[in-house]
C-alpha cells in the first residue's frame, strides 16, 4: 500500500508530504495506481521547484518520497495551488483504490 501523509504547520498550511510503499495493484512496471500517485507527487515537486521557483527539501528514492517547502513560501498562491491540487488528487485516488492508497493528514512533528 502507498501511504501519503500531508503535514500541516501550526497555521494549518500544507508544509510537507511524505509517501512510502507500493500500491500492489499490479505487477511492478504495470501498476498504474502506484504510477499515478508517484506522478502526482513528482509533478508537485517539479511545480514547486520550476514554476514557483522555491527550494524543495527532501528525497526521492525507490518507494519513498519526502518533500518540504520553506515556511516563507507557504502563503503564496502558486505554492498553495500546487500542493493543494496534489493533495486533492491523492485523496481522490485513495477513495477509488482504498486497498492500495491511503491519504492522511498530520501536524508537523
Image: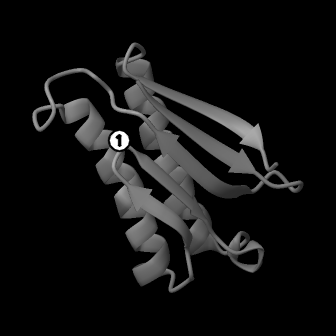
Relative to residue 38, is residue 97 depicted above or below? above
Q: Is residue 55 left or right of residue 44?
A: right
Write down the residue under mark 1: 37
Q: Is residue 55 left or right of residue 72?
A: left
Q: Residue furthest bottom?
A: 53
The residue lying toward the viewer, choosing from 34 and 60, is: 60
Q: Residue furthest right?
A: 10
Quadrant in which residue 74 is drawn: bottom right
Q: Give me the residue at 16% from left, 33% from top.
A: 28
Q: Secondary structure at mark 1?
A: helix
* Residue 1 position within the rendered picture, expressed as x and y whole percent measured from the top left: 40, 24
Q: Give me the residue at 67% from left, 75% from top.
A: 76
* Residue 45 position within the rendered picture, expressed as x and y whole percent measured from the top left: 44, 66
* Residue 85 position within the rendered picture, expressed as x and y whole percent measured from the top left: 48, 52
* Residue 92 position within the rendered picture, expressed as x and y whole percent measured from the top left: 43, 30
The residue lying toward the viewer, choosing from 104 and 19, is: 19
Query: For the image shown, how many numbered marks are present on the structure?
Result: 1
Q: Give me the residue at 37% from left, 20% from top.
A: 100
Q: Give me the residue at 37% from left, 43% from top.
A: 63
Amino acid at each position: 500500500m502507498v501511504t501519503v501523509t500531508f503535514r500541516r504547520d501550526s497555521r494549518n498550511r500544507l508544509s510537507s508530504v511524505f509517501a512510502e510503499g507500493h500500491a500492489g495493484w499490479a505487477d511492478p512496471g504495470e501498476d498504474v495506481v502506484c504510477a499515478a500517485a508517484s506522478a502526482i507527487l513528482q509533478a508537485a515537486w517539479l511545480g514547486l521547484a520550476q514554476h514557483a521557483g522555491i527550494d524543495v527539501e527532501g528525497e526521492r528514492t525507490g518507494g519513498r518520497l519526502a518533500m518540504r517547502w520553506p515556511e516563507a513560501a507557504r502563503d503564496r498562491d502558486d505554492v498553495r495551488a500546487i500542493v493543494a491540487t496534489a493533495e486533492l488528487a491523492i485523496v481522490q485516488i485513495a477513495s477509488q483504490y482504498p486497498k492500495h492508497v491511503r491519504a492522511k493528514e498530520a501536524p508537523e512533528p
